[in-house]
Image: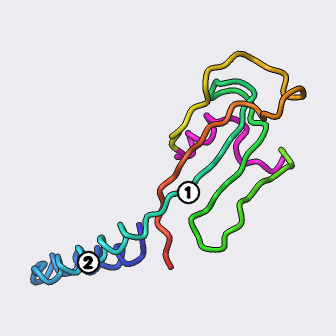
Amino acid sequence: MSSKIEEWVSLARKKVKNEGISNNDLDQLEQILQIRCNQNRQRLLYLQATTPSIRSNVIGMAQHEPVNGAITQIEPDTDDWKYQTVHDAIVDGWQAIFFPAQRTNFDDHEIDILGYEFILQKMEVYDE
């Protein structure tokens, strides 16, 4: 929970014990929540896996952050990857928004395709 909401809840609890919450208090909460909703941004994670299964090993990844001037993070060292499977990312709160086509297996050394690509998203609040 954001600090502004936590502050509002703390103050509201004190007011409930004393004189109660007013309409002005509720208006203030509504304004805080509206600002928070407007700050939700979509984070994207592209994962390439060895098969179309969400439990197969990830062999490539790129993370795109919703911030002006942000550089796409492509980490070539598999030891530094936070997720070893697409399932790991889903467990961490990422939502799959694109699944790869269910094509047959191929040898990626012969063609210019890197695995089966999954696209995942996370909606998160970004405080400016």
Residue occupying image coordinates x 10% and y 81%? 22
Residue occupied by mark 2: 31
Nearest the eye: 45 or 36: 45
Residue occupying image coordinates x 37% and y 78%? 4
What span is colored magenta in the figure?
A: 79-94
Does residue 90 show up magenta in the picture?
Answer: yes
Nearest the eye: 104 or 90: 104
Quadrant in which the N terminus is drawn: bottom left
Residue occupied by mark 1: 43
| x, y percent for residue 109 | 90, 28
Does residue 2 show up magenta in the picture?
Answer: no
Above or below: residue 73 compared with residue 51: below
| Total numbered labels placed on residues in the image | 2
Q: Amino acid at mark 2?
A: Gln
| x, y percent for residue 13 | 23, 75
Residue occupying image coordinates x 82% and y 34%? 112
Side of 76 where 91 appears, left or right: left
Side of 124 where 60 appears, left or right: right
Side of 120 where 14 appears, left or right: left
Residue at far top of view: 104
Side of 59 where 43 appears, left or right: left
Q: Nearer the viewer, mark 1 or mark 2?
A: 1
